[in-house]
Amino acid sequence: MRVQRENLRMVGKLGVIALGMFAFGYALVPLYKAICEMTGINVLALSEREVPGAKLKLPANTQVDTSRLVTVEFDVNARGPWDFKPERRSMEVHPGQLTTVMYEFQNIQNRTMAAQAIPSYAPRQAAQHFNKLECFCFTQYTLAPGEKKQWPVAFVIDPRLPKDVTTITLSYTFFEVGGKVPAEPVATQAVPLPAPAKAERT
């Protein structure tokens, strides 16, 4: 009898614990939203909310240095018979401002190719202040003959960039990756086979 009573008591305790866990899990979502709104941790998720008839007002980015402008030039060095270019050659940005520029690539060869890009910066000290949040560099891409693609480069210039640096050149060297695609077919000249020898008459 005592064992049965203890078993019922244990089942009751487990039921209370399970009910408490369920209630905590159910309340976790609104609790998380309230904490995020109070602390501003999940600011990016605010742009995904759709409120009919209401205009969304995001907090201003206080890290943008609006007192100065930096000219960013986009240069390309394409080694090979393909078309590779930025959508624009230069733009002026504020340090701390998130900026995106598109690059277009087209394989104008009559064969499939694999290629990748490597970035470089001028002046050299600007490299540590040029932060790319999205980039196609160091990734190998395979394109079919005539295929065209566009890739974004999202970047932010660190506000700690020295004041004397007013122009930054972002240069991409785009080159074919060897061993990833079959080599271009080479026309070979057919060699005529020797004529069969005539049998001698005896």
Image: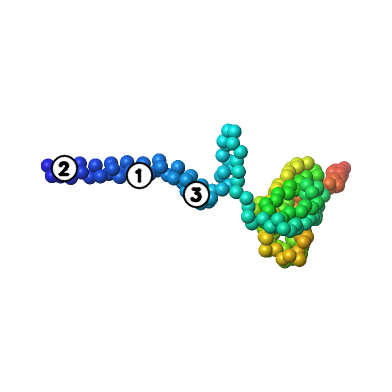
Quadrant occupied by the N terminus:
top left
Asked which secondary structure carries label 2, the reply is helix
Residue 11 position by quadrant: top left
Q: Which residue is mark 1?
A: 21
Which residue is drawn at the image coordinates 60% and 43% (left, top)? 57
Quadrant occupied by the C terminus:
top right
Q: Which labelled disc corresponds to residue 38?
A: 3
Which residue is drawn at the image coordinates 75% and 57% (left, top)? 69
Question: Nearer the observer, disc 1 or disc 3?
Answer: 3
**Dot 3 surroundings within 10 Å: few (below 14), some, or many (20 or more)?**
few
Residue 201 appears anywhere in the view: yes
Residue 66: percent from the left, percent from the top?
A: 70, 56
Asked which secondary structure carries label 1, the reply is helix
**Dot 2 surroundings within 10 Å: few (below 14), some, or many (20 or more)?**
few
Foreground pick, 119 / 180: 119
Residue 57 in the figure: left or right of residue 23: right
Q: Which labelled disc corresponds to residue 5?
A: 2
Q: Earlier in the sequence, mark 1 or mark 3?
A: 1
Question: Nearer the observer, disc 2 or disc 3?
Answer: 3
Residue 114 appears anywhere in the view: no
Q: Earlier in the sequence, mark 2 or mark 3?
A: 2
Residue 151: percent from the left, percent from the top?
A: 71, 47
Residue 2 position by quadrant: top left
- The residue lying furthest to the left in this view is 1
Which residue is drawn at the image coordinates 20% and 43% (left, top)? 9
**Dot 1 surroundings within 10 Å: few (below 14), some, or many (20 or more)?**
few
Foreground pick, 37 / 186: 37
Residue 101: percent from the left, percent from the top?
A: 73, 49
Residue 49: percent from the left, percent from the top?
A: 56, 39
C-alpha distance separating marks 2 and 3: 48 Å
